[in-house]
Image (tube, rainbow, N blue to C red):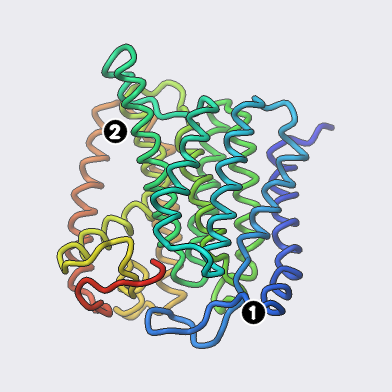
Amino acid sequence: MTIPADLIAFAVALVGSLLLTIPIRRLALRYGMVDHPGPRKVHVSPIPLLGGTAIYLGFVLALLFTLRGAPHQQMVGILAGATLLAMVGLLDDGGLLHHQVKLFIGMPVAALFLLVSGIRAQFFSELVPGTAGIVLDGCLTVVWVVGITASFSILDHMDGLCAGIAAVAAGFFTLSAGLNGQTMVRTLGAATLGAALGFLRWNFNPAKIFMGDGGAMFLGFLMATLGLKIRPEGSHFPVTWLVPVLILGVPIFDTTLISISRARRGLLPFTSPGKDHTAHRLSNIGLGHRGAVLVLYCLAAVFGSLAILVPRILPGAAYAVAAILAIGGLIAILLLEGAPYERQMKLERSSSAD
């Protein structure tokens, strides 16, 4: 009996990241690659970094075992962009790069790797025929990749949050791809799911290791790529775009919340770290650290379930779902703005964002 490639990818990535985290944690401790406690942190003792390296290696090992027959050009583009961001994040974790390099150079260049490989958004080309639509789709691809990658970078602010949300999202990308016969996307999603879950064993509260920006940006880039690749059969434009947006609903919501909240207070959203994220506010209203993270896991599962449902209902109903969620999101932002959180000083500058 032939074992499906996605199951092999999941198993290899899971075991790889699970086991490789152990020596990588020791390496981080040996060379002092740790995240120290601070006023904008929730941990009270130094925690080893470099966990993203285990996630990266587990994912790459899975691809080596399963995707030999995949489109070569696209795989090179995906691995090149993912490797670039893993390296940029690693350098940033070590304090060797200015934090804005990852946002204004690393992430856009990774998006360009996807474009060169033939992976791009297909939104404006459905509306504007010819070269203009393709150019606009190229711009949207860069914005999408930078936005989603950055959203996961700043989502890594509580034990188990970023890895868990990435795992849930990857699971729904895998399921959606399987339902629509997208073998390559299903295998990529399964490998991402396994790598994230293997690391989550060591990262869930109380965390024994952090993934660092190298891991968060790596996972964010893979989420953005899966979002560009997913193609639900039988659904009409623009309903197709609701699928990746819903699957990535939690990081999109969190980024929207802190962007609006910080902008209202005269802060730059991506350069003003603080304990004002969705998880922080949920924790402060009585859910606690684990409770807040688990609630966001559940919300991610709800959004993912809707993403599976949306392509199978009438377009009018899909638009109604999108409108209800958008209104509900705005109401949630208003309510969470009233929840207690630690306020940053106006126009505060920092060497890194969370």
Question: Residue 166 location, x and y as percent?
Answer: 51, 54
Q: Quadrant of residue 63?
A: top right
Task: Identify which residue is drawn at 50% across, 42% down.
Answer: 110
For the question of whether residue 205 can be seen, the reply is yes
Residue 312 appears in the figure: no
Q: Quadrant of the N terminus?
A: top right
Q: What percent of the width, then of the height, locates residue 203?
A: 59, 70
Callout 2 crowding tier (Cα within 10 Å): few <14, some 14–19, many ≥20:
many
> Amino acid type of disc 1?
Gly
User: Which residue is located at x 81 percent, y 32 percent?
Assistant: 2
Q: Which residue is mark 1?
A: 32
Q: Which residue is mark 2?
A: 318
Residue 64's x, y, as percent?
Answer: 75, 40
Q: Residue at x 27, y 80 (%)?
A: 342
Describe residue 292's horizontal placement relative to residue 268 as left or right. right
In this rendered view, identify the residue nearer to me: 124 or 92: 92
Label disc, if present, on residue 228 of the rendered structure: none
Find the residue positioned furthest to the right.
1
Figure check: 4 above or below 17: above
Residue 182 picture quarter: top right
